[in-house]
Each structure stands twice: as structure tokens, then as C-alpha cells.
Amino acid sequence: MAKSVGLEPGTGFHALRHFYASALIRYGESVKVVQGRLGHASASETLDTYSHLWPDSEDRTRAAVEAVFAPPSDSDELSG
């Protein structure tokens, strides 16, 4: 089945499920949303499995400070 949709042989349901969860997390979905989509019984089950994929506060604060001090882009100069 994997081959018929262009996936590597051996790509199974578990790998696709992990990819789906990873994509939801990457695009900012909450633990509750991911829990619901995956059918986990609790948010702790989701966090036990995927917590390493959510950015921690250190990542977010670093990104925020970098954004504040980043040089303006061309689009910033055009709109301001």
C-alpha cells in the first residue's frame, strides 16, 4: 500500500501517524488538539510520546528576541 501512494516500502501506519502528529505540532497545534486527532485517552499520553517535538519556552523566547532585533526586511520598509 505504501508504494501505491509514493511512500518508501516499509512505511507503516505507525510512521504515518508519527508524521501526522509531528506536522500538527510543527504548525502550532496544542496538545489537546493533537490528543484528539490521535485518539489518545489523555493529554499526558500525547505528551509522553511527543513532548520532544513541542518547542520549549527557551526556544520561543530565543526566537522572540531574535525577531525583535532582526534587521528590517524589504517588506517592512515598504509598509512603514
Image: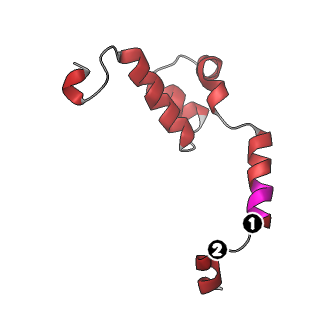
Residue type of the residue flagged with mark 2: Ser
Give the colour scheme of this rendering.
secondary structure
Residue 3 percent location from the top left of the image: 23, 22
Q: Is residue 4 magenta?
A: no
Task: Identify the residue at image location x=64%, y=83%.
Answer: 77
Task: Identify the residue at image location x=26%, y=21%.
Answer: 2
**Quarter of the picture holding the N terminus:** top left
Residue type of the residue flagged with mark 1: Ala
Left-right relation of 16 to 33: left
Q: Secondary structure at mark 1?
A: loop
Q: Between marks 2 and 1, how big is the CA–CA gap?
A: 9 Å
- Tell me whether the residue at label 2 lies in contact with that at label 1, contact meaning CB atoms closer than 8 angstroms: yes
Q: Which residue is mark 2?
A: 73
Residue 34 percent location from the top left of the image: 52, 31
Span shown in magenta: 64-68
Predominant SS along the magenta part:
helix
Task: Identify the residue at image location x=76%, y=55%.
Answer: 64
Left-right relation of 63 to 41: right
- Can you name the residue that lies furthest to the left here? 4
Residue 70 falls in image quadrant:
bottom right
Q: Secondary structure at mark 2?
A: loop
Question: Callout 1: 10 Å neighbours few (<14), some, many (20+)?
Answer: few
Task: Identify the residue at image location x=66%, y=86%.
Answer: 80
Front one among 66 and 36: 66
Question: Callout 2: 10 Å neighbours few (<14), some, many (20+)?
Answer: few
Q: Which mark is residue 70?
A: 1
Left-right relation of 6 to 26: left
Residue 15 falls in image quadrant:
top left
Residue 53 percent location from the top left of the image: 62, 30
Q: Is residue 69 above or below residue 37?
A: below
